[in-house]
Amino acid sequence: MDILNALVALANFVIVPGLAYGAQLAIGALGVTLIYGILRFSNFAHGDTMAFGTAMTIIATNLLLAVGITFGPLPTALLALPFGIGLTILLVLFIDWLVYKFYRDQKAKPVILVIVSMGVMFVMNGVVRFIIGVNDIRFADGERFIITARDFKTMTGLNEGLAIKTTQAITVVVAVVVVAILFWFLNKTRTGKSMRAFSDNEDLALLSGINPDWVVKVTWMIVAALATTAGVLYGLDKSFKAFTYFQLLLPIFASAIVGGLGNPIGAIAGGFVIAFSEVTITYAWKKVLVYLMPESLEPDGLVQLLSTDYKFAVSFAILIIVLLFKPTGLFKGQSV
Amino acid sequence: MSDNPYQNDRGNKDRSITNKGGSTIQEVDRRFGNSKAKQGDPFLIGDAMTGGYGKGPDILHSCTIAAEKGEIAVIVGPNGAGKSTAMKAVFGMLNVNEGAVRLDGEDITHLTPQQRVVKGMGFVPQTSNIFTSMTVEENLEMGAFIRRDDFRDTMTQIYDLFPILKDKRNQAAGELSGGQRQQVAVGRALMTQPKVLMLDEPTAGVSPIVMDELFDRIIEVARTGIPILMVEQNARQALEIADKAYVLVQGRNAHTGTGKELLADPEVRRSFLGG
């Protein structure tokens, strides 16, 4: 019984939140890794693209709610998601045409594009705050829980409860669907294969008659869709705040680099590695240990390695360790 | 080239923020050329080409290279003679300031390399000539990217020509051996059903046995009627299979003739073939 209680506590506080957060990071990191692979630079504006997409989705959600449309037990934001994605696609294509295209035509070195993306980041930062404000916004509606801790306790008779939020389940399901579609697209369709070819060997792709402008456009569209989806899922699960999304850039980049930049499978694996590291290191293990250890050995403190305030330090430390000892990431990426 | 400030990356080697690679195909001045085909013109001819990379000095000086239908034409010469440069000039990858390139009587001097592929030229670069992360079959599919029709027949023909590729068709091309990679590269170029095939040192870096096999395959491709223009380091072997051979020295035509003639030429023997 003690072991079961320990497992349930672990699932409730580590596994379920870790899975949801990992899925959100994975979708975010996929966007970063696609830009890195195909446009060949690290897009620092990615966090703010997520924020913009989420802001647009929130506005669309409010409009839907205003006319009385809801999605039943599911969050209305899922209905509004396509609008958010559409507007974000328009924005990134506009930014690409206005800013990045100029540098591509100059055949600018990627490091210049990195700096350019920082400029774009600051501008988008301002635009998002201007549109939606700087406050914390909760926009999840519908059923809050699939199963609450109390129901679980009465069902199983255990001391520990397992709560699964609707948003956590939605996050995992949506992530699986998104990843499946993305991999199908990259591996089976003509355009997807041409994107991989372009990422692999740009000269040869050009000599094979692959149209670089089209490849770049499709990449931006996919990235906008991924960023918006990741942003909305994160916002539903926690809350939306422009500054938080800007901060998400660090764990997302850490995920992409841990997995191996440019490698989509790596981005997903990296997302879960970072998420679980953050959650396990900032979790107070006392609750689980109490069930597992004999009474005499029970810990006095919380057994929390780091306070949750330091969660970004975890991604940062992992990032540095990976760059020092395995710069190409877990799956062979392109960094040196 | 280097006077463009956007192309200065300040010694950045941090691959965690930028991805190396990217296009190295340079912008080329395409104002030149407008020549009329002459009677008895070869199928593909780079006629009296003078030119070089970017704003740099001319590397080629009135250099003429041609390939006739059903023939293998070979460019040989010492290191730095401009062999690869001559081939790139024919393919439109550098400035041709004088002279012209004609394919089947049509002046194509002003076309970009991509447009020349559409016109029916297949080009196999010397290095990074395959998509290493993609499977053999995907490499061939990408070769046929400009084709909208059904290309399965062509793929079957290529698998017949290079049986080893059929066995490895679902393997990543980067995992293959040097000789197999070259077969993938040639196969990729053949997927467009080109009217002329250009090979830049196809046997560079492969073992002598594999080299013999590659030469056999190249002869087989030529027998299907596709003219082949080839740059080769191994002058002796290349001259043996060549119907037409060009010896370049410092960007100029030094000797021209059939492969056998040049093999027998005492001066060619002395200077390039080691006696």
Image: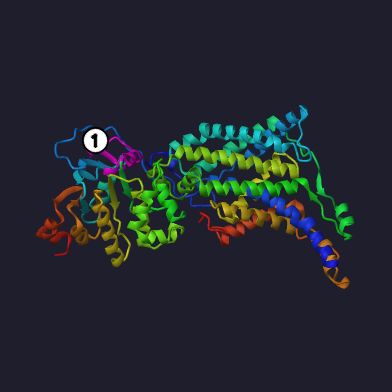
- Residue at 19% across / 46% down in the picture? B68
Query: Given the current orientation, which residue lies at the most extreme top position?
Result: A67
> In the figure, A293 relative to B72: above or below?
below
* Magenta stretch encompasses residue B93: yes
Q: Where is residue A273 in the image (x, y as percent from the top left)?
A: 66, 57
Q: Identify residue for label 1.
A: B106
Instruction: Give the quarter of the image for residue A135.
Output: top right
Horizontal and vertical percent position of residue B248: 19, 51
Q: Identify the image's colour scheme: rainbow, by chain, secondary structure or one colour.
A: rainbow
Q: Is A301 placed above or below B44 here?
A: below
SS state under label 1: strand
Identity of the residue drawn at 13% across and 61% down: B269
Work out whether residue B22 or residue A177 is closer to the camera in this orientation and state it.
Answer: A177
Question: Residue A101, can we see it?
Answer: yes
Specify the subunit that label 1 lies on. B
The kind of residue tagged 1 is Glu
A241 or A263, which is in the foreground?
Answer: A263
> Which region shows up in magenta?
B90-119
Mark 1 nearby-residue class (10 Å; few <14, some 14–19, many ≥20): some
For the N terminus of chain A, give its image quadrant.
bottom right
Q: In this view, does B107 lie to the left or right of A81?
A: left
The number of callouts visible is: 1
- Foreground of the two, B105 or A44: B105
Q: Where is residue B255 in the image (x, y as percent from the top left)?
A: 14, 51
Look at the image and say whether residue A78 sits in the magenta stretch.
no
At x 52%, y 39%, the residue is: A218
Q: Where is residue A43 in the image (x, y as percent from the top left)?
A: 57, 43
